[in-house]
Image (cartoon, rainbow, N blue to C red):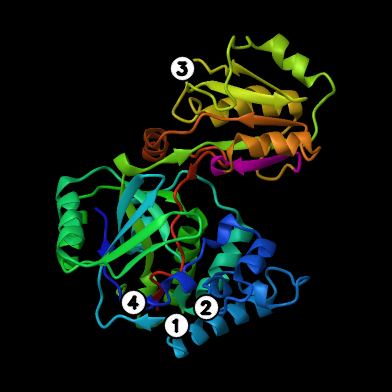
Amino acid sequence: MAIIHPFKAWRPTTDNIKEVACVPYDVISSEEARKLAAGKPKSFLHVIRPEIDLPKNIDFNDDRVYQKGAENLKRFISNNILRQENEPAIYVYRLIMGGRSQTGVFTCVSVEDYDNEVILKHELTRPVKEDDRTRHILSQSAHAEPVMMTYKDDQPIDKLVEETMSNLEPIFDFKAEDGVQHTVWKSNQSDEVAKAFGGVEHLYIADGHHRCKSASRAAEQKRENNRNHTGNEEYNFFPAVLFPMSQMKILAYNRIVHSVPNDFKNQLKNKFQVLETVSPKPENKGEVSVYIDGEWFGFKLPVSEEPNSVEKLDAHRLQSFILQPMLGINDPRRDDNISFVGGIRGTEELENRVDSGKAAAAFSMYPTSIEELVEVSDEGMLMPPKSTWFEPKLRSGLLVHTF
């Protein structure tokens, strides 16, 4: 059963929250981070993307990057940009985007649960990204950003969340530049919330696999260097926002291919039955829309006989029947001929990439469902890379966990 751990968060004041809060580290490039943080010394990007305060040509894993991140976090604390709560607590975090809201529990979860598969994953992690995040965690003695997780809906937890929102004033309530409203309440029933999660069998990683793995690796190193390790030290826990499944929204994660054979469009049309009507966004699971030479067309993806939970996924079917056999893309994680575009950017972005010559073809996908994610996780299997794009994104810099 899931272990939930209240924590003494470092957080901005109500007055400077909009100056501090920023997008997560992994949804923007270094160059985009530099532009977003320009003239904003309180932006939390200085902590999670510290390379923006160093020369542009610096390597992302240069020692100076991690040192600068630690320095910047210390500056935030010493200058009272972040102030620590007096006691451990659990929080409620609501996001509203386009009129749709989702509300989760912002708390710390257990490295032990991750290692023992109470917290379930659905993606592989890359060692180079693990190394990077682990070094950030250890150099800062902090988990600067939360992981997004989900769990099967639970009425007692829902009741506690509703009581917090109804009875208490929020500590934060602001609209970010992208129009998403972020509201945070500090629960006065933290022990009750933790106890309620004791009845939850599994937590499922939605967004943040590398942060989870890196938290585990960092805890292992701290444990090895601590002769008096008890398991209760703060490095044994890391922050996450836990949302009930029914509130999760997954967008498509689309694909662009940079080079295709000259007759690739005809190959597709000859091999697969083209749909009579097509939208740039597929209307049904198992359908894919393709953009080549200024034209959208669509077809149904084949499926294996007696498929398992992974083989049913549209991303797997596209990989197995088109990308690998027709384009030679054997490992989409490492092949330079394929790139991925989050569904939040819209199908216009796919058209722009192809029309500008930056790509030769674009594949617009039907979104993976949260039920598919949970089924794959429960079976201990892994999804193809870039199968899910979650929106809205959590904001970074709201509540920071140190150890």
Q: Amino acid at mark 4?
A: Glu
Mark 2 falls on what kind of element? Answer: loop
Tell me which label, 2 or 4, sits earlier in the chain: 2
**CA separation in Å, label 2 and label 3:** 54 Å
Q: Residue at x 71, y 24 (%)?
A: 325
In the figure, residue 174 lies in which quadrant? bottom left
In the figure, residue 80 lies in which quadrant? bottom left
Q: Residue at x 56, y 62 (%)?
A: 25
Tell me which label, 2 or 1, sits earlier in the chain: 2
Q: Is residue 179 left or right of residue 329?
A: left
Tell me which label, 1 or 4, sits earlier in the chain: 1
Up-down relation of residue 379 to residue 239 (above or below): above
Tell me which label, 2 or 3, sits earlier in the chain: 2
Q: Is residue 87 left or right of residue 204?
A: left
Instruction: Kindly identify which residue carries mark 1.
Output: 81
Instruction: Kindly identify which residue carries mark 2.
Output: 42
Q: Amino acid at mark 2?
A: Lys
Up-down relation of residue 10 to residue 90 (above or below): below
Tell me which label, 3 or 1, sits earlier in the chain: 1
**CA separation in Å, label 1 and label 4:** 25 Å
Task: Using a 10 Å C-alpha cutoff, classify the residue at mark 4 as few (fewer than 14 neighbours), some (14 to 19) or many (20 or more).
Answer: few
In the rendered image, residue 198, in percent from the top left (x then y), is placed at 20, 55
**CA separation in Å, label 2 and label 4:** 29 Å
Instruction: Kindly identify which residue carries mark 3.
Output: 306
**CA separation in Å, label 3 and label 4:** 47 Å
Q: Amino acid at mark 3?
A: Glu
Task: Using a 10 Å C-alpha cutoff, classify the residue at mark 1 as few (fewer than 14 neighbours), some (14 to 19) or many (20 or more).
Answer: many
Instruction: Tell me where the magenta segment starts and ends, as one range.
Output: 336-344
Q: Which mark is residue 344?
A: none
Mark 1 falls on what kind of element? Answer: loop
- Can residue 277 be seen from the camera position used here? yes
